[in-house]
């Protein structure tokens, strides 16, 4: 919630504009507002559900961080599609069950999303 508030207040320094012609502060303000609503809902819900101990596994944290770093390196030196595949296959090692078929389906979905962002929104992504 603190991060959402920080980015939301920073976004208010920029012109918000209108829905028909959004200014540079509109998108960050909307995203930080949604994150703030999610944060408030999470805090309120925490008072009504039973507390559950959450163990901390440093091995899984290292796997996820290495997957993100590997995604950045593979995306820089090969391409982003290979980086997405690397990220999915390596990060699922932190889970309780490993399924290569599930990883293929998740990779295909993320690649489809990246292609949609590139072709439909015109983002400059190094997919190929």
Image: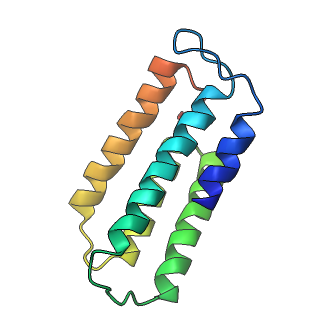
Q: In x, y percent, where is residue 87?
A: 47, 59
Q: Is residue 106 left or right of residue 117?
A: left
Of residues 6 and 100, which is closer to you in this image?
6
Residue in the picture at 58% in, 70% down: 66
Q: Is residue 92 left or right of residue 10?
A: left
Query: Where is the C terminus found, in terms of image quarters?
Result: top right
In the rendered view, tell whether residue 95 sits above or below residue 88.
Answer: below
**Quick check: can you spot residue 81?**
yes
In the rendered view, tell whether residue 75 sits above or below residue 100.
Answer: above
In the rendered view, tell whether residue 85 sits above or below residue 117.
Answer: below
Count the marks: how many? 0
User: What is the basis of the colouring in this image?
Assistant: rainbow
Residue in the picture at 47% in, 28% down: 117
**Quick check: can you spot residue 126?**
no
Q: Residue furthest right?
A: 13
Q: In x, y percent, where is residue 124?
A: 61, 27
Q: In x, y percent, where is residue 77?
A: 66, 48
Query: Where is the N terminus found, in terms of image quarters?
Result: bottom right
Residue in the picture at 28% in, 80% down: 96
Q: Is residue 56 left or right of residue 9?
A: left
Residue in the picture at 50% in, 25% down: 118
Q: In x, y percent, where is residue 9?
A: 70, 43
């Amino acid at each position: 919630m603190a991060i959402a508030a920080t980015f939301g207040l920073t976004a208010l320094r920029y012109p918000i504009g209108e829905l028909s012609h959004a200014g540079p502060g509109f998108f960050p303000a909307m995203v930080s507002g949604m994150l703030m609503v999610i944060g408030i809902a999470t805090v309120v819900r925490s008072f009504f559900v039973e507390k559950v101990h959450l163990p901390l596994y440093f091995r899984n944290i290292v796997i996820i961080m290495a997957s993100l770093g590997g995604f950045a390196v593979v995306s820089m030196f090969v391409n982003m599609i290979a980086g997405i595949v690397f990220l999915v296959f390596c990060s699922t090692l932190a889970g309780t069950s490993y399924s290569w078929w599930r990883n293929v389906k998740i990779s295909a979905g993320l690649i489809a999303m990246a292609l949609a962002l590139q072709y439909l929104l015109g983002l400059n992504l190094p997919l190929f």
